[in-house]
Amino acid sequence: MRVAIMKTNGYIDQKIERVLMNNGINGDSIQKVTRQTINSYDAIIFSHKNNIPNVAKVLEQIALEKKVLVVYINNILSIGHFYNLLQDEFFIIINESTMDFELPSVLHNSMKFIKKI
């Protein structure tokens, strides 16, 4: 399983990389998402620290292509701006405080589910 981490140059990048490495998942840091990125990885991880204008629309466009799992790590309970994606099987929101055990589980289980689709 190949996972891309959208780089923020902050503590959360290191935390995500540590969680992935401890669970035997290959995680690469990327600066931007391109068509080649979508085709090269099984999942792309974004966080609330990414400085992306209109992040909900960007994530929606990526998830709607049905080629890569989009994981968004959030630190607040308000997720209303992701209402179009909440039922999409290619989009998952994870709380930052539970990321240590939730992220590896979600990645392994979602990859199995998506491959069957």
Image (tube, rainbow, N blue to C red):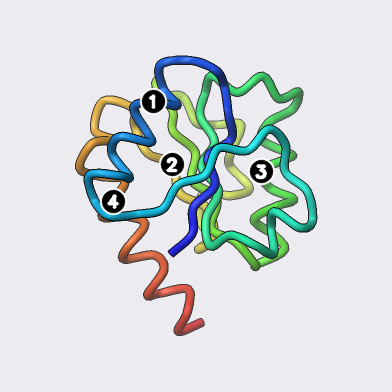
Give amino acid for label 4: Pro
The residue carrying mark 2 is 93
| Amino acid at circle 3 | Leu
Q: Of residues 110 and 39, which is closer to you in this image? A: 39
Residue under label 3, please give it.
Answer: 59
Upstream in sequence: badge 4 or badge 2: 2
Q: Label 2: state its secondary structure.
A: strand
Give the spatial CA distance, label 4 vs label 2: 13 Å
Q: Secondary structure at mark 4?
A: helix
Disc 4 from disc 3: Cα separation:
20 Å
Mark before the other along the chain sequence, 4 or 3: 3
Query: Which residue lies under the disc numbered 4?
Result: 104
SS at circle 3: helix
**Residue 61: percent from left, percent from top:** 74, 50
| Residue shown at 53% from the left, 62% from the top | 42
Marks 3 & 1, CB-CB < 8 Å contact: no
Q: Which mark is residue 14?
A: 1
Can residue 99 be seen? yes
Residue 116 higher or lower than 15, as above or below = below
Tell me the kind of residue under disc 1. Gln
